[in-house]
Image (spheres, helix red, strand yellow):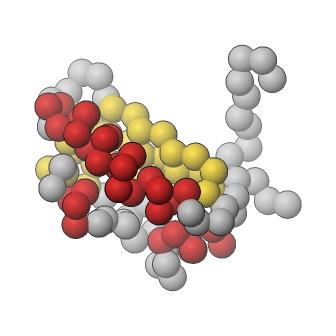
Amino acid sequence: MSDPVVRRWEAVVAREDVAEWVGTFRTRALPGMRAVDGFESVSFLVRRDQDPCQVMVLTKWRDMAAVANYAGENVAKTVMPDFMAKFFKSYDAEATFYDEVLQEGRNE
């Protein structure tokens, strides 16, 4: 079995739009991601000292086949539904990928 794959993508969002962006993602985009076999988790990181804010989206997948089930044949290409695009002042055209080789929690 291979290590989980983390797909990293970055964008810029106005600080005043962050809450609405997160809410829209939760209600409109996340259900579709959860339905993809191999989806494990998503994290949003928002840089603290900027406005507009640099944001990083990390999605974790079982393997690259799961990423392809989500993103299509070009796994690096940004997946951008029209209803999400309005939040971004700019965004990466492609994602980058990392193998997760360690993930520990408080009680592990």
Q: Is residue 97 visible?
A: no
Count of marks placed on residues: 0
To which quarter of the image does residue 48 belong? top left
Q: Is residue 39 left or right of residue 105?
A: left
In the rendered image, the quadrant that contains the C terminus is top right
Q: In this image, 1 relative to 69: left or right?
A: right
Q: What residue sits 37% from the left and 67% below the top?
A: 79
- x and y percent of residue 42 in the render? 51, 45
In the rendered image, is residue 82 in sight? yes
Outermost residue, right side: 1
Q: Nearer the viewer, residue 26 or 3?
A: 26
As drawn, which residue projects farthest toward the top?
A: 106
**Residue 91: horizontal and vertical position, in percent?**
25, 55
Q: Is residue 1 left or right of residue 97?
A: right
- Identify whether 83 is placed above or below 65: above
User: Which quarter shows the N terminus?
Assistant: bottom right
Q: Is residue 95 left or right of residue 106?
A: left
**Residue 98, percent from left and from top:** 60, 52
Residue depicted at x 63% and y 51%: 40
- Measured as percent of width and height from the top left, residue 15 is found at 18, 31
The answer to which of 65 and 32 lies nearer the viewer is 32
Q: Residue at x 43, y 60 (%)?
A: 95
State the residue at coordinates (75%, 53%).
3
